[in-house]
């Protein structure tokens, strides 16, 4: 009888970190308590999967999230997905080189394990990126005509992020007003694009507010994009079929994270903050054989 695979899926900000506040161009900081429980999780034989809305580039910054996992021996049997499951951070073996030449020792090429970014895509991403550039310009203009001060968000990833992000030079108290107007404009502009033969929309779109730095940011993204996409990719990487049985938990700090429960045997655990996460994970581990 084959051993049942055990997996834990984690949102990062607000779960493994002390705060859920997003600061552009920074890497999420694991708390000391998170590192301790992640080590216990590994000891219990769980595969760990980290899924976040952050870009892979941010996760891989010097002294950042991925490096901290590596320093603590937590990268083995681990998957890291950025941009809500769109991009996967991975390690791959390759030949060691010096000045462009392969290094040999005792007649054999030296193989090293080097961190790389491995691109993963969902079905309509190439179409969507073109669509993003065209539609994003129209939405921005409409928001300006509506009287809002808008500019591209500082956190926007031009190439490898499937989201359209806009930052508003408006007080946070107007957040709800901005959200409703953005939803209205996105729906209107998508209908216009969808009625053209050349630039018809390949995907349905959602709008989410992202509070940041005292000013509202609106994220416009494909409905099919989400942390559940990272879970699907991890299951595929592990060659787990729908008929296979697994022991799995998914941790998130928002109601929308409940989408991570894409299988009956994935138990979704909503946490309030890092302290709550540590408490709940310890309770789960105490029950594990």
Image (cartoon, grey):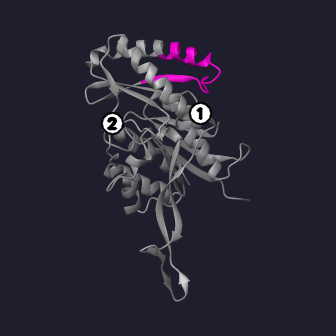
Q: Residue at x 41, y 29 (%)?
A: 165
Kindly tell me whether residue 179 is visible in this rendering: no
Task: Please state the horizontal and vertical placement of residue 53, each as a whole percent of the image.
Answer: 44, 38
Q: Is residue 190 magenta?
A: yes
Q: Pick the quarter of the image with the C terminus.
A: bottom right
Q: Is residue 258 above or below residue 5?
A: above
Q: Is residue 167 above or below residue 125?
A: above
- Give the CA distance from mark 1 to mark 2: 28 Å
Q: Is residue 138 above or below residue 287?
A: above
Local packing at callout 1 (Cα closer than 10 Å; few below 14, some 14-19, many 20+) is some
Q: Pick the quarter of the image with the N terminus.
A: bottom right
Task: Please state the horizontal and vertical placement of residue 179, each as a whole percent of the image.
Answer: 40, 16
Magenta segment: 186-208
Q: Which residue is mark 1?
A: 127
- Say the numbered circle drawn on residue 22: 2
Q: Is residue 204 magenta?
A: yes
> Which of the two discs, 1 and 2, labels the residue nearer the N terminus?
2
């Amino acid at each position: 009888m084959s051993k049942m695979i055990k997996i834990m899926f984690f949102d990062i900000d607000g779960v493994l970190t002390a705060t859920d506040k997003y600061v552009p161009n920074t890497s999420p900081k694991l708390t000391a308590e998170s590192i301790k429980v992640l080590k216990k999780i590994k000891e219990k034989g769980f595969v760990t999967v980290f899924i976040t809305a952050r870009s892979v580039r941010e996760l891989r910054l010097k002294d950042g999230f991925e490096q901290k996992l590596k320093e603590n021996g937590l990268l083995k049997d681990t998957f890291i997905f950025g941009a809500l499951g769109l991009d996967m951070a991975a390690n791959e073996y390759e030949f060691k080189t010096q000045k462009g030449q392969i290094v040999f020792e005792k007649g054999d090429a030296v193989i090293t394990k080097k961190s790389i970014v491995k691109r993963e895509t969902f079905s309509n991403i190439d179409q969507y990126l073109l669509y993003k550039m065209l539609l994003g310009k129209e939405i921005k203009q409409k928001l300006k005509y509506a009287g809002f001060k808008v500019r591209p968000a500082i956190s926007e990833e031009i190439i490898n992020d499937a989201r359209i992000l806009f930052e508003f030079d408006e007080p946070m108290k107007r957040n709800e007003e901005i959200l409703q107007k953005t939803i209205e404009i996105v729906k209107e502009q998508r209908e216009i694009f969808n009625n053209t033969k050349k630039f018809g929309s390949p995907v349905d779109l959602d709008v989410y507010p992202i509070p940041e730095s005292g000013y509202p940011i609106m994220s416009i993204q494909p409905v099919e994009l989400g942390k559940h996409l990272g879970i699907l990719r991890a299951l595929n990487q592990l060659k787990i079929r729908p008929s296979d049985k697994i022991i799995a938990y998914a941790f998130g700090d928002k109601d929308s994270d409940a989408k991570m429960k894409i299988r009956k045997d994935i138990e979704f655990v909503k946490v309030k903050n890092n302290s709550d996460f540590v408490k709940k994970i310890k309770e789960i581990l105490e029950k594990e054989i």
